[in-house]
Image: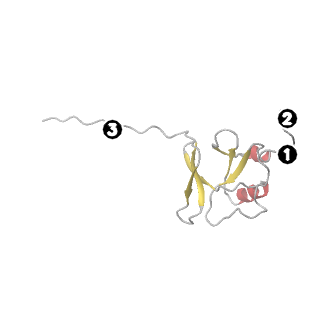
Amino acid sequence: MVTSKKKRERPAPRYLVTTIPKVSRCIKCRRVMLSAYVFGDRITIDPQPVNLRAEAMALIMGIGTYEMSLIGKPYPRHRNKFDIRDGLPSYGRVHPQHCCGMQWTDPQYRDSRKIFDYDKNAPCPF
C-alpha cells in the first residue's frame, strides 16, 4: 500500500522584514522594552529616547542606536555613521538598543525636545 506524503507548507521568507515595535519585557532584567524586526533581524530597544551625548556614549560601549519617526508608522531604522554625523532627526527620536543594567533615565541623557514646536496661547490662524 502506497501512501502519498503530505506537502509541508513552507513559511513565508522573513528576510528584509521590518515591523512596528511591540512592548515586551526583558527576560533577564524584567524592564520594559520594544521588540521589532529590522530587515529580518530581531532587535530590542529601550523606549526612552536619548540625546546626542547618550548616543555617543552608547556607540562607545558598542550599543547600536535606532531612529523611530513620529510621523507615519514608527518603523525603527538603524542609524549609520552619516545619520549620526547629521545630528538628531527633526521628526523622530533616537532609541538605544536594550542592554541589561544600562538605564537611560538620567536627565542628562534624555531627549527633551518638544515633539512639535507651537505656542499654546497663540490665536487660531483660521
What residue occupies the far top of the structure in this picture? 126
The residue located at (59%, 44%) in the rendering is 20
Nearest the viewer among 63 and 24 is 24
Image coordinates of residue 39 in percent, x first then y, are 58, 42
| Closer to viewer: mark 2 or mark 1 | 2
Q: Amino acid at mark 2?
A: Pro
The reply to whether the C-beta atoms of the residues labelled 1 and 3 are less than 8 Å apart is: no
Nearest the viewer among 85 and 26 is 26
Mark 3 residue crowding within 10 angstroms, few (<14) / some (14–19) / many (20+)? few
Mark 1 residue crowding within 10 angstroms, few (<14) / some (14–19) / many (20+)? few
The residue tagged 3 is 8
What residue occupies the far right of the structure in this picture? 122
The dot on residue 119 is 1
What residue occupies the far left of the structure in this picture? 1
Image coordinates of residue 100 in percent, x first then y, are 61, 64
Position of residue 83 relative to residue 54, above or below, is above
Q: Amino acid at mark 3?
A: Arg
The residue tagged 2 is 125
Disc 2 is placed on an element classified as loop
